[in-house]
Image (cartoon, helix red, strand yellow):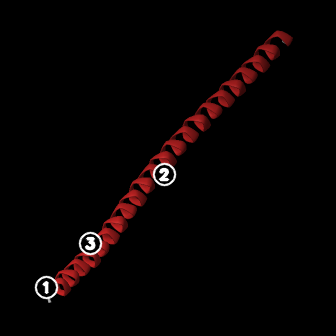
Amino acid sequence: MASHEQELQDLEEKLENDRHRQFLSLKERLNAKRNRKMDELRRKQDVETTKEIIEQKKEVDEIKLKKVSGLIVHYLFLTMM
């Protein structure tokens, strides 16, 4: 009888250990998935930020070009007088 109870107790411990191991494995997989998603989101945000910076630099360059072109036209106009 004691042997049977010991077997049951051993089986219960084994089941509990298996459940705990599976829980830890699942938790680890979910954490890894969450980390991958966060990394992907950061990469997308970095790409968007880079695009915005490039667009802003392009706009600034266009303004500078217009300003310089206007100065050149004005200078040429003054030298022709």
State the image coordinates of residue 31 (x, y, percent, origin top left): 58, 41
- Distance Cα–Cα, label 1 vs label 2: 57 Å
Q: Residue flagged by tag 2: what amino acid is it?
A: Arg
Q: Residue flagged by tag 3: what amino acid is it?
A: Leu
Quarter of the rendering occupied by the N terminus: top right
Which numbered disc covers residue 39? none
Which numbered disc covers residue 80? 1
Give 73 or 32, whichever is nearer the viewer.
73
- Distance Cα–Cα, label 2 vs label 3: 34 Å
Residue on which the image places disc 3: 65
Q: Nearer the viewer, mark 3 or mark 1?
A: 1
Give the quadrant of residue 18.
top right
Quarter of the rendering occupied by the C terminus: bottom left
Q: Horizontal placement of 10 versus 38: left or right?
A: right
- Distance Cα–Cα, label 3 vs label 1: 22 Å
Check disc 1 and report its element: helix, strand or loop: helix
Q: Is residue 15 above or below residue 30?
A: above
Give the quadrant of residue 11.
top right
Check disc 2 and report its element: helix, strand or loop: helix
Q: Residue at x 34, y 71 (%)?
A: 60
Q: Is residue 15 above or below residue 38?
A: above
Q: Horizontal placement of 9 versus 33: left or right?
A: right
State the image coordinates of residue 63 (x, y, percent, origin top left): 30, 75
Q: Nearer the N terminus, badge 3 or badge 1?
A: 3
Check disc 3 and report its element: helix, strand or loop: helix
Q: Horizontal placement of 20 versus 33: left or right?
A: right
Which numbered disc covers residue 42? 2
Q: Residue flagged by tag 1: what amino acid is it?
A: Met
Q: Residue at x 51, y 41 (%)?
A: 33
